Image (cartoon, rainbow, N blue to C red):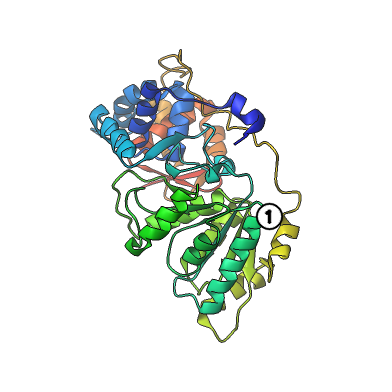
Amino acid sequence: MDLGANAKNALILNEAQRLAWLRLIRSENVGPATFRDLLNHFGSAEAALRALPALSRKGGKKSLRVCPLQDAEAELAAHERHGARLVALGEPDYPPHLRHVDGPPPLISVKGGTSLVSQKTIAIVGARNASLSGRKLAARFAAELGREGHVIASGLARGIDAASHEAALGSGTVAVFAGGIDVLYPPEHDRLLAAIIENGGNALSEMPFGWKPRGRDFPRRNRLISGMSLGVIVIEAAKGSGSLHTARFALEQNRDIFAVPGSPLDPRSEGANNLIRQGAQLVTCTADVIEALAGRIEPALPFTPDMSEPDDAPPSLFDAEPSDSARNRLLSALGPAPVEIDELIRFTGESARTVNVLLLELELAGRLERHRGQRVSLIM
């Protein structure tokens, strides 16, 4: 597949760098946002790994678990045995639109072909206990969008998800997992998953190999489904369903939200109908979606510029060691209510780099929570 100019500027990790990235994201209290900040501050994952224990101690945590090298090597080996691979943010086969969400996963587990690199990915989500007409609608949207060159992303769940994947087998589809890429849920979709892979589609997960999904992992999965897509089509979503979480993420990620209207007497349509009332685009056929997306597809999205891994990275990029007085001023400004990081910089009078270092210390110590809109709060 021709990736255009992006391929020339793509990040390619060597084996040692990939292991270091894996160790860093698997270390205690390191999430996507923290990973990005650590890499930006220290220049490489190896340097960040060396700094983790000292940073967490300064934040008030006596010991922090850094992922052992042997654990990362074992996870890489497990991927190879499973026919999967770990793809880093910025590498050519990382989903192009997912690169631009807030806090994209630094590493994703991928199995299958090249469907996930499509610039024309559309998500279709909806009820697990979908009606027959709902399943037929999902299949029609998926098949017709596939014929127009779109790849279909969904969550491999029962109902609307399964119908969408099945109809898009010939044109490309991506199944996003809530657990590890080796943990199929629901288990009865083993044949469907095999068909997806055999036809050049993909399975994708940001969770560790072997991770069994919990309830809170499904919203994280939904964030990836919307993040890798130009827009999300919602069919038969009940009030409070996970599909509405996907729509909320799509709104935050500046994605188009499409909703298929349903009978007001069917509780499975309550969520989709409410989305329309709140401003989602009402769609009844594929032409509605294609018309709404006209002009939204960019030929070559740039790679994220600040997720680099130079071979000659310096051991530390800090201007200077933050002072105790700076730590005290920052702590006095923080509380349980979220506050913008820019406000903290103005209040403390410290440089942005110093404030970010101090926030990293607190986050690695498990004392800081990050919120949308570049806001943070202290965990009391």
Kind of residue at disc 1: Glu
359 up-or-down from 54: above or below = below
Is 297 situated left or right of 335 in this image?
right
**x, y percent for residue 176:** 45, 52
**Residue 164, position as x, y percentages in the image:** 53, 63
Please tell me whether mark 1 sits on a helix, a strand or a loop.
loop
| Quadrant of the snapshot with the N terminus | top right
Going 31% across and 31% down the picture, which residue do you hit? 56
- Residue 185 location in percent, x, y? 35, 59
Q: Is residue 340 above or below residue 348?
A: below
Q: Position of residue 311 (x, y in %)?
A: 45, 15
Residue sitting at x 44%, y 57%: 219
How many numbered marks have been drawn onto this rendered protein structure? 1
> Which corner quadrant of the image does residue 3 belong to?
top right
Q: Is residue 291 visible?
A: yes
Q: Residue beneath label 1, please?
A: 148
Residue 72 located left or right of residue 236: left
Q: Residues within 10 Å of mark 1 (few under 14, many from 20)?
A: few
